[in-house]
Amino acid sequence: MPGQLGRFKDGASLNFLANVACHSPLRALMEPSPATALWQLPRSRRLARECLLQPFVRGLAAGSLPVETFCCYVGQDAFFLDSFQEGFNSAASCAEAAGLAEIAARFKSLGDGVTAEKELHRSYASSLGIQLEAVTPLAATSGYVDFVARAASHQSGSGPTTHAFLSQICAAMAPCMRLYSWLGTVLADAGATQTAGEMYSKWVTEYSSADFGQLAAELDSLLDECVRAASTGESRQEIGSLLNELSQIYTQALQHELDFFEQQPTGLDFHAGGLPSHALLEAARIIPPRVLIMAGSDSGGGAGIQADIKSCAAHGAFSTTAVTALTAQNSHGVQGIFPVPLDFVREQIRSVLGDIGTDVVKTGMLATSETVAAVVAGLREERNEVERWRRLLVVDPVMVSTSGHALLQAGVGAFLETLKSELFPLATIITPNLPEASLLLGGRVIDSVAAKEQAARDLCAMGPRWVLVKGGHLDTGAQTRSAEATDVLCDRETGLCQHFKASFIVTSHTHGTGCTLASSIAALLARGMDMAEAVGRAKEVVSGAIAASTDLALGSGAQGPMNHSWMHAEW
């Protein structure tokens, strides 16, 4: 996808694809392109961006890269390409043994394409005096070689089906080719063929060429075909497991690419010697992290959509909105809740997803069962199937505010039932506070950390992949700065719980802490963090905001707002 990038750290959080697969039509998972969806994962975008801004790439583009650094790169890359070519040969042999002659021929052709790439390296080696046969791999090179070798090792008669195995090989190798095609194209668009000098402009020309782009597109096409073939006749859960595995492999491969660039010793100072990052980013047209917020408006600015927007901005995410309710509130509490027409809710969702798109959807106050149903309908109506496939959903089941005000309109029973049956099964994570968790569990008393863990496990059974039970309310009785507020994160797949602790801070400025935590998690997921990392960082940020707001001169009531900008501005 030259000229445009469309998340995750390798790890359990990528299982969101398995969750989505269980609740989306098979067609939605297979069209238009699994390869494009993998490339557009937020973590994939983040890693590709980091590769683009690496000193090696910027120095090469500017022509200021030290020759000895380029010599090191050429030797290491030539060493790696031997194993990369072997990966294609292994895939071809596997396909041939399974009677897939046409697919085998295509893998062989891709292997021949690597031969042409190796010729470029040989020409560099000849002109620079590099003895390729004497190259010793550095740590990142060895790690990448081992990664490809593991992906290409196939035990006949066991393990995944042939198409699933070939999908895994493609997922391990496609990121390299797509990344290099993208880097070459971006550098060419940024004018690097004029700035890089004769030696380095050959690199830009090679990887920005239509021929290399066609090789990358061919491997993407093989990945798509193998995923579709492997998914034929499988259950949605099995499809989800395959997609989850491929996403981990894909992002691991991009991490290896970044590590490979980082191991090159550049010693460059880009105040003096590299192509400016703004020139590369302008050419790349990288999509920023995006969060669609569906929540109520808080006139006091402490919670609701206002808090969500400020939190996303603080984390560097672009936020869009679908207003689901209007409230009149301030530091003294909620004075009024006013409904929003359901058609307007749906139209806002349609408007945003049909144009800007999103990486993460964050829901807050929905107030009625009809609004929940409208939100679910709006998400399922999205026509861009790739967007549906990779989109995450953070659900803050707002029912009771921090100050204790009920935020639901009439029909609590119907609201809870719709939330559990319609929205929770689509959720990546839900983030109830203790009163909300208790309400969802039929009024259960949650009065200890152990009770929080059990509550989180029981809420996981309602469908979300993760549950974060927020613990601030449990610790308010201590009323001391030494008390700890413990949040519990449960992973549905493993049943394991993690604790996130922070000192309990005595202050009246806690209005909107739940909104801020959930939207911070959403923004950090959109930036490519895994779930535990995002929750931990969000917890730190909210705790910092509370600490920075203890003497904030805003509002005269018992629930004052926080300084969401504390990381950037002191008030």
Image (cartoon, rainbow, N blue to C red):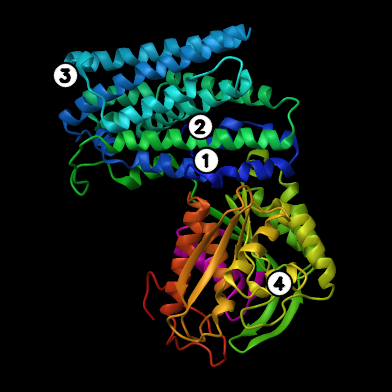
Q: CA distance from mark 3 to mark 4?
A: 69 Å
The region drawn magenta spans 296-319
Q: Which mark is residue 433?
A: none
Please identify the quarter of the rendering in which residue 474 is found: bottom right
Task: State which tag comes first along the sequence, 4 or 1.
Answer: 1
Circle 1/circle 2 CB separation < 8 Å: yes
Q: Which residue is mark 3?
A: 128
Q: Which residue is mark 4?
A: 438
Please identify the quarter of the rendering in which residue 298 is found: bottom right
Task: State which tag comes first along the sequence, 1 or 3.
Answer: 1
Task: State which tag comes first along the sequence, 4 or 2.
Answer: 2
For the residue pair 347 and 389, the one nearer the viewer reads as 389
Q: Which residue is mark 2?
A: 1
- Secondary structure beneath label 4: helix
Amino acid type at image mark 3:
Leu
Q: CA distance from mark 4 to mark 2?
A: 47 Å
